[in-house]
Amino acid sequence: MTAPFYATGVFGEQTGFIIIVFVGLAFGFFLERAGFASARKLTAVFYFRDWAVVQMMFTALITAMVGLVFLRSIGWLQWDALTLESTFIWPQIVGGLLLGMGFVAGGYCPGTSVVAAASGRLDGIVFIAGLIAGNAIFGFGYRLLSPFYSSGARNVYSLSDWTGLSPATIGFLVVLMALGAFAGIEFSNRRKAIRGEGTARPEGAPRAISAGGITMRLTWKRLGAAMVFGLAFVLMVGTTIAGSNEAGNVSTLISAGKDQIEPAELASWIAQRKPVLILDLRAPDAFAQFHIPGAKNMSFDQLAKADLPKDQPILLYSADGVRAGQAWTILAGRGLDVRVLKGGLRAWWAEIATPPDLRTGGGSGQAFAGAGAAASSGEGAASAPKAPPGGAKFKKGAQCL
Amino acid sequence: MNPDKRKAPWSPYLAGLGVGLTLLASFVILGSGLGASGAFSRATAALFNGLAPTYTQSHPYWHAYFASGDSPLNDWMIYLIIGTFFGGLIGAVTSGRLQRTVEKGASISTPNRFWLALAGGALSGLGARLARGCTSGQALSGGAQLSLGSWAFMISVFVGGFGLAYFVRREWQ
């Protein structure tokens, strides 16, 4: 059994809906426990009074990130089967600025406003009314906004794609950065506590006990933080090593250039109707959303058992080529004519499928895939993209987040 | 609710660990992260669908919510937000923080606080749609995936917040 369980068919949509309610319950509960139902607590970060927002967010982010990077590196989590956030850099920067301004003016962000409303904060309810109004403004202005909304498109584009560093290395740097930020926050909190005690000690508050209280709290926090980061470091170091091994395998493969084909060459094969068996090694969901015309979807297990033809080339591809490279090492030993699509589906996107949709596409993930497939069928292939399956409800995509 | 019964908030590290593990579980079990703003987009579409179905179902953005022939509200994001609401309620009841009140500084009136909450909500709603997500869906979930756009978004949120903070300082004093 590999994760994510929903995409790999462990349970159906109805069960998924029940599970998601419990995920929400936990999310809401922890937000409330952090004190984030209070707009005053949340906005205090913008006045350098309370850094809980930064502390909580970065702890949550690195906890999840370390888990994801680790599970991915041991091959237990199918990365391509996750709903990955697409990058549309300009609207994301402007949207972030607007949301940040809304945060300090309104006192909440969308998630915390729900928790605020649940705990009786009337301003939280008003904020939610504002959210609906903002969504209505977006809807009414959509025709005007849509060129900007789809600008700066990079599809799924990560910090490691951008910098060329492995996900584990980036993860490691993020943990270091968070650690530095936490150390700075703890230092400034302690200084404030000491200063506060020196100047404005409440009447009758014995100095020694309150000082003791501060020390106790800081020690407890430090202990928790040390545990989190100790774990993070161990996992990150482990996965960095695992990641470099993986990169080593792939680079060996890349050096044997004859076993790879360029996206343009594959496009011309398809156009000439050259017999080739194209195998897509991504998750069924991702396959259903978009695939190279004529490709068959196959899992690793199926591939290992499959009776593959010896008289025609077999072309393997995955999202970025890593999994296809691994599959190649399994199949190449069997005396088959196995090739790997250079750069994976991402390169196919960039070179074959993408150019027309940046000008004409609507900006949704769906339009993206549709326009991409139209571009590739323009190369002479006939297959149309399949509609997303019923399970697409769990796909955030661009439209439904 | 008796204020004496209120418990202090958890350490932000502990709460963050809880949210992080929740997020990780969501990825592992369901394949997707957390998200809050999408539910409001769907609620808006459902609202307009009640008022003007033809318009909404042929709207260039909202039509996608009706593509499955289903209500836009029958979606995982809605179930997630319902869970979040009740999770918050359970948290507030058990911590003694359930209280009908308005969060504001002493130097602003309640009506003015409401106007700013409304305006802030509208800015956030618009911003979240442009950015394809909010602090939960974009900054947290996309950030954990190390998506470039999500990190750009997260940095922008803090830039926007710190940038406007001076001008609304009276709201929180």
Image (cartoon, helix red, strand yellow):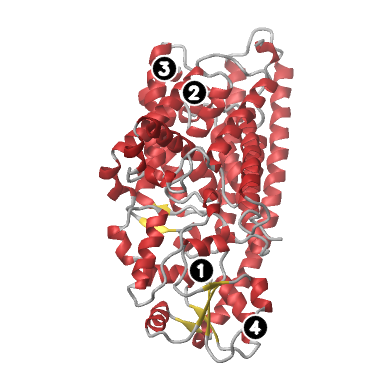
On screen, residue A338 versus residue A384, left or right, reads right
Q: Pointer 2: what residue?
A: A124
- Cα–Cα span, label 3 and label 2: 11 Å
Q: Name the front one of labels 3 and 4.
A: 4
Q: Residues within 10 Å of mark 2 (few under 14, many from 20)?
A: many
Q: Are marks 1 and 4 on the same chain?
A: yes
Give me the disc on residue A304: none
Per the image, label 2 sits on a secondary structure element best described as: helix
Per the image, label 3 sits on a secondary structure element best described as: helix
Q: Residue A102 placed where, x, y %?
A: 40, 31
> Against B2, is A308 above or below?
below
- The tag earlier along the polypeptide, 1 or 2, is 2
Chain of the residue where label 2 is placed in the rendered structure: A
- Cα–Cα span, label 1 and label 4: 25 Å
Inspect the image, locate mark 1, and give the three-letter code of the amino acid beneath it.
Asp
Q: Residue A8 placed where, x, y %?
A: 64, 59
Give me the disc on residue B113: 3
Q: Quadrant of residue A301?
A: bottom right
**Cβ–Cβ under 8 Å for marks 3 and 1:** no
Who's the residue at 61% across and 84% down the image? Answer: A308
- Cα–Cα span, label 3 and label 1: 49 Å
- In the image as oriented, which residue stretches furthest toward the top? A203
Q: Pointer 1: what residue?
A: A320
Q: Pointer 4: what residue?
A: A307
User: In terms of depth relative to the viewer, which is nearer, A326 or A396?
Assistant: A396
Inspect the image, locate mark 3, and give the three-letter code of the amino acid beneath it.
Arg
- Cα–Cα span, label 1 and label 2: 43 Å
On screen, residue A224 versus residue A133, left or right, reads right
Q: Residues within 10 Å of mark 1 (few under 14, many from 20)?
A: some
